Image (spheres, rainbow, N blue to C red):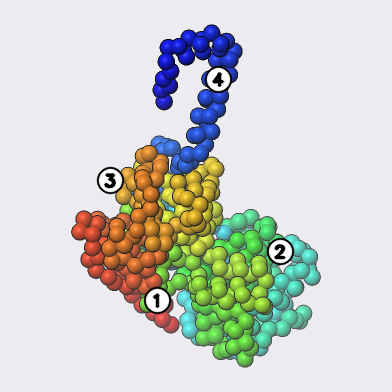
Amino acid sequence: MAWYVDKKTADLLSELLSVRMLWVSVSTILMLGLAAMTALPLPLPPPGPPPPPQAGPSEADRRFAEEYLRRFYALRPGPGRRSRAAEPDDGWRGGVCDELRRMQRFFGLPPSGELTEETMAAMRRPRCGLSDAEPFADTMRWRKNELSYRIVGQSLPISAPRVRKTFRAAWKIWSNVALMKLRKRKRRDADIVVSFHTGDHEDGSPFDGSGGILAHAFLPGSGVGGDVHFDAQEDWSFNSTGYSLFVVAVHEFGHALGLPHSPDPGAIMYPAYNFAPDYELQLSFRDVKDIQHLYGVSPNFAQLVLKSPPPRTPDKCDPDLSFDAVTELQQELLFFKDRSADFCFILQFSVFMSQSELSLCLLRFMWRKHPRFDETGITLISSLWPDVVPSHLDAAYENVEKYVNVFFKGDQYWALRQLLLQEGFPRNISDLGFPSRIKAVDAALHFREGRYTIFLTGNECWRYDEQQEAMDGGAKLIEEQFPGIPTPIDAAVVHDGFVLFFKGNLQYKYNVDLKSVTSTSPTNELLDCQKNDDQTK
């Protein structure tokens, strides 16, 4: 900014102002400038260096992965195989790749057959020691509906009364929904024996110390059939630290009753330990359906459902499916969805449930569509991003120029780079230049070539210049900018040269150049929905 004064005034100022006074004036101007700067929208983090290319897996990772696949997916190592650092790909053909794809499909990962970082992360998560390929059958169950169990061992890692109370509550979780009774006995003729062990305890499935394998169980039957073993070296707890003994017990007791592992990441029978410290366990719809298939329905189940309905994991084949948010991530499309809104609504207003049990709604899911693969599997958001990504997202987009993923919920937004939350986040959306009347963002459209993002809020849209880090003008009506698109919108994404808008169970394919909707289709059209036996049984 330039300042203009006449000569007379300038002479007068030069006589009156000392060097000290000039310094004070300059300081004042600088302070005013800084104050003005603080009033401007705060930008996203400056672009850092591009993510380094992923190095190939180390030989140690390969050996770990082969052991994992051997133990949990029945991989049979080839005869005489030798590991050679100079020829790392020799052992990753044929059976190894096939079983790796099988594992990736089970965990909802892109089935590339390659040992990616996220695949290794899934393998290293604490989990149950039972195989994911265990040959369970529909008839793998006890031939009676009244079972007994006993707890053996003198050196329990926690107090015996707490162990007994925890196991009694864990059995009750199953007997509340299925037609069965379980009683604790001290005699040797109990059907199921529950115990704690360390290391190799001579059952063919040694424990590995803290982390890794938490516990395992045997299928129903005579002898050791139905027995449950816990790793005594784990940090077992009943609060917000360590591993919840109650949660793991419910999972293992499910095996003892005849249930296999489930690929449903919202089910208690999912093999990996998925639970936040404040998680209040409830069987999922899938868990309930599977145990009732084996033993029948408890006479108390109808009353239980009215009080607390079992939560459902989102189903990509649901004709009424809607999305919370959709975004691109490099080559992939990510579709975000939390648990049923109806379930969470009922739970929130139920007089029978505590506020802590609202954590049941906090499991966050996503589908990942990759152009190289036909399958689109469901997985937890936390399998890719840390738990700082909020539940019930409103919007999300990928800022390619800055290597940042941005998430919106309510009046806050989060920025993550290379899976890490950036310093100073979450921030208020007013930092982006929104007026105070805007309380949330419904969807975000990032245009890579133009380097701008369009935010949709109610019946309005806003253009944000990613280079200038400021709003480009004020709000405009969506009906004027995108004729034919209903409002408010649920989610939106730029994909393959079109804009895809999602509202309810419909997808609108929009041509920006023609400013018109080219087609409408079911929301789940891109998810390659094909009902399989696992989904329909």
Circles 4 and 2, Cβ within 8 Å, touching? The answer is no
Q: CA distance from mark 1 to mark 4?
A: 65 Å
The earlier-in-sequence mark between 4 and 2 is 4
Circles 4 and 3, Cβ within 8 Å, touching? The answer is no
Q: Amino acid at mark 2?
A: Phe
Q: Amino acid at mark 1?
A: Asp
Q: Secondary structure at mark 2?
A: loop
Circles 2 and 1, Cβ within 8 Å, touching? The answer is no
Q: Secondary structure at mark 4?
A: helix
Label 3 neighbour load within 10 Å: few <14, some 14-19, many 20+: few
Single out the residue that lies furthest toward the front: 8
Question: Which residue corresponds to mark 1?
Answer: 320
Query: Residue at 46% across / 70% down in the picture?
Result: 263
Q: Nearer the viewer, mark 2 or mark 1?
A: 1
The earlier-in-sequence mark between 4 and 3 is 4
Q: CA distance from mark 2 to mark 3?
A: 52 Å
Q: Please state the horizontal and vertical placement of residue 148, each as a whole percent of the image.
A: 69, 83
Question: Which residue corresponds to mark 3?
Answer: 449
Question: Which residue corresponds to mark 2?
Answer: 238
Q: Secondary structure at mark 3?
A: loop
Which label belongs to residue 132? none
> Toward the viewer: 371 or 327?
327
Q: Classify residue 96 by image quadrant.
A: bottom left
> Toward the viewer: 236 or 441?
441
The earlier-in-sequence mark between 1 and 4 is 4
Q: Nearer the viewer, mark 2 or mark 3?
A: 3
Q: CA distance from mark 2 to mark 1?
A: 38 Å
Q: Is residue 103 visible?
A: no
